[in-house]
């Protein structure tokens, strides 16, 4: 309950974005492979940022 108003760190925001992009890529994989590959590339770019934050 005390963490209710705690702000998310930059790393937590990027991790959430990464998971969201991977979920979108998975959904697109059955419909449009090119769009799925683009989302996966975006997710990999976000992962690189996460790893650089350490």
Image (cartoon, rainbow, N blue to C red):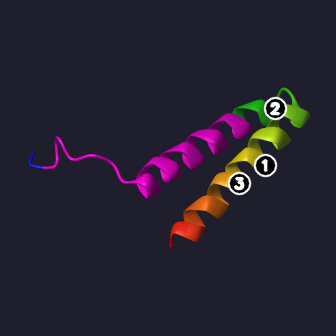
Residue under circle 1? 41
Residue under circle 3? 45
In this view, the mark in front (2 or 1): 1
User: In what element is the residue under mark 2?
Assistant: loop
Image coordinates for residue 52, horizontal then vertical, percent: 59, 69
Q: Is residue 45 left or right of residue 5?
A: right
Q: How many marks?
A: 3
Cβ atoms under marks 3 and 1 closer than 8 Å? yes
| For marks 3 and 2 on the same chain, the one whose residue lies earlier in the sequence | 2
**Residue plotted at (73% across, 45% down):** 42
Q: Residue furthest top?
A: 31
Q: Is residue 25 magenta?
A: yes
Q: Main secondary structure of the magenta part?
A: helix
Against 15, is 53 above or below?
Answer: below
Number of other residues with Cα within 10 Å of mark 1, as a class: few under 14, some 14 to 19, many 20 or more: some
The image quadrant that residue 11 belongs to is bottom left
**Residue plotted at (66% across, 63% down):** 48
Image coordinates for residue 31, horizontal then vertical, percent: 84, 26
Number of other residues with Cα within 10 Å of mark 3, as a class: few under 14, some 14 to 19, many 20 or more: few
User: In what element is the residue under mark 3?
Assistant: helix
Real-space Cα distance between discs 3 and 1?
A: 6 Å
């Amino acid at each position: 309950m005390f963490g209710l108003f705690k702000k998310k760190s930059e790393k937590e925001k990027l991790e959430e974005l990464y998971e969201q992009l991977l979920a979108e890529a998975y959904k697109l994989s059955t419909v449009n492979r090119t769009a799925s590959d683009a989302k996966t590339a975006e997710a990999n770019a976000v992962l690189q940022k996460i790893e650089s934050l350490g």
